[in-house]
Amino acid sequence: MNRQGRGSTGPGRPSALPDHGYQPTAPVRELPDGRLLVAFHGDDDRRRVFDVSKLPLPGWHQALAAVVAERTGPGGGLRTFAAATTGWGSLSRLVKFLGALPEPPASLDQLTPAHLQAFHDHRARTTPTTALRDMGEARLLFALPALRDLVSAEVLDHLQRRLPTPRDSKPSSTAVETEPSPPGNGAKRLTTGYSDGELTRLLAALRSDAAKIRDRIRVGEDLLRRYQADPLALDGNDRDLGRVLERMAATGQVPTPPAVRPSPFCPERGQLAGHLFLTLRDLPPLMMLTAALSERNGETMKELPVRHRVLEDRAVELVIVKRRRGTRRWFETVTWEIGAPGRELHNPGGFYLLMLELTARSRQWCGSPLLWSVWRNGYAAGLGVPDDHVAPFQDSLSCASILPTAWAANRTRPLLADPQPATAGPDGISPTIPGQGLPLQVSFNRIKTSMEVRRTKRMGGHLPSAAKSNSMPVLFRNYLSGDPVITAWAEEVLGEALVDAEQAARQAHERAAKAAGGGPRVLPGPVDTAAMEESGIGPDKARQAADGELDTGWTACVDHDQHPLTREPCQVTFLDCFHCGNCLVTRDHLPRLLALLDALAQRRRELAEEVWWPRYGPAWVAIRQDILAKFTPAELQHAQADKPHDALLDLIENPWELP
């Protein structure tokens, strides 16, 4: 059966099965010359053969071959070329170390915890960053049946213990960098996203270079088409170039241009190849623009497939690879918008179709199922032939070096980072001249972070909606947390929200005060009856207030039996006193008011902002702006020393409303 694609199975249509009597190829093979090989075929469709016989300790070989086959097999955890190679490296280092010991363990039952501890100590001294990885891989290997039943229980217990993390270790990013740090200046590689200005300049440069590449190939294709239609209609130079392009299109070979000295490394051949083919130098801007438009990482861009579907000329559907998602969870079907004609450089679907167009001629010679196919000089690649059409990432993601920072620095108009702010001079007083702008550090990681930040801002900070290719914890931890752009935006949003909440509380206080007699009466200075009488309080009430007989929770009430709004006995809580015309505040009330502010601040840390502001905000605004502002700093400082420990805030709350 050879049914493929969507709709090939369903009720009454079972999945395709191999022919009767099919036997899968054994992953472990022993050749007549004694070599023991383990074949690997990963989920990324890459292959490798591991030669176990090249390792020391021959008594281990059969068990090692079985455990490598299981670890890299369909049910194992190493299902990509890179992962399997890394795991094989950890195993090889362990076996080679044991084989180099003065008394190596000739068989697995001779392995002791001291051997493993010596290996860990050796790796911690030489390469501490990979010591834990090597021991972790050894733990997984020895847990498999092929090794677990052949070693002692002490060895298994030793492997299961928790290993100390190096103090100077730094957490690694989840995404894989595709270029080394710039040498010479000792600068740390940036992992944060770009500022708005930097991202705008970067995208403009990427689109500019992509447009030049597109126009260059389309001009060459147009000249080839006109030459094949009517060579005599062209002038002499175009006719000669058309003849060369016709030969290139038919054979895939790029000749040495006329009047150029033949040389295996002739740069003019690369320029001539650029009329019809993409070259390795074209990849950085094209791949980075694809990553920015699709909002995916560099690894996914390298493995974009040719197979796709066009949905009603509006979108492109294809299956992409998203690594590090766990077994059998790498593949994801995405739909990218094509956009209007002429907007290919702004929509992921349209740009994907454009790349299919530009890579079509190289792909017909290399036959790769992946999108990226280019021409390269075979002599420069060490192949001994003049021309080679290759899919640079088909065998491995690291087969071709993509240097985004070098591309940014070598452009005719180099990309620069935002100028550094002026800092204090050597004397600590006079400022230095602001920086002129360093070369922009460009990487797939920073582009991915920038696009994640912009999408999160578009979603209003709602992480469930912003999480696209990662989970919410990964999105926050690896992309949003600590990014200066998202931090500044969050501070701006939070500041605006606090201002709105404070204004709403202020307006609520003003409305309540207007309805209840104009708000509290504040009497700064010494507490005496004369000042109270001048404020409109009767002699009897003034004497009682001066003696503290009218005190309530935090203030005093000059007429509890007649509320200014209802003209009836007061039924409101003590927090509503701060809006009432019967409320009286003197210097003696300051300690309790300051203690109440501390209690409100503590309650604010316990409640959500949308709960705290409606409940306590109007009273907080009244105390801060209408009461405390009328006392001197000396009075407030004196009251601060006398404030009570219990603010009595719990007395006005219903028990079921307490946080």
Image: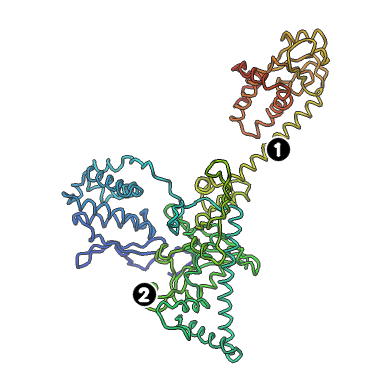
Q: Is residue 34 left or right of residue 260?
A: left
The quarter of the picture where residue 157 lies is top left
| Type of the residue with mark 2 | Leu
- Which residue is drawn at the image coordinates 66% and 67% (left, top)? 340
* Tag 2 residue: 383
The quarter of the picture where residue 424 lies is top right
Quadrant location, the C terminus? top right
* Tag 1 residue: 500
Instruction: Give the x, y percent position of residue 357.
Output: 55, 73
**Along the line of sight, the residue nearer the viewer: 18 or 501:** 501
Q: Is residue 358 above or below residue 163?
A: below
**Along the line of sight, the residue nearer the viewer: 26 or 91:** 91
**Mark 2 neighbour density, 10 Å: few (under 14) some (14–19) many (20 or more):** few
Q: Earlier in the sequence, mark 1 or mark 2?
A: 2
Q: Which mark is residue 11?
A: none
Quadrant location, the N terminus? bottom left
The quarter of the picture where residue 14 lies is bottom left
Instruction: Give the x, y percent position of residue 224.
Output: 55, 83
Instruction: Give the x, y percent position of residue 521.
Output: 77, 19
Which residue ends up furthest to the bottom in the rendered image? 232
- Number of marks in the image? 2
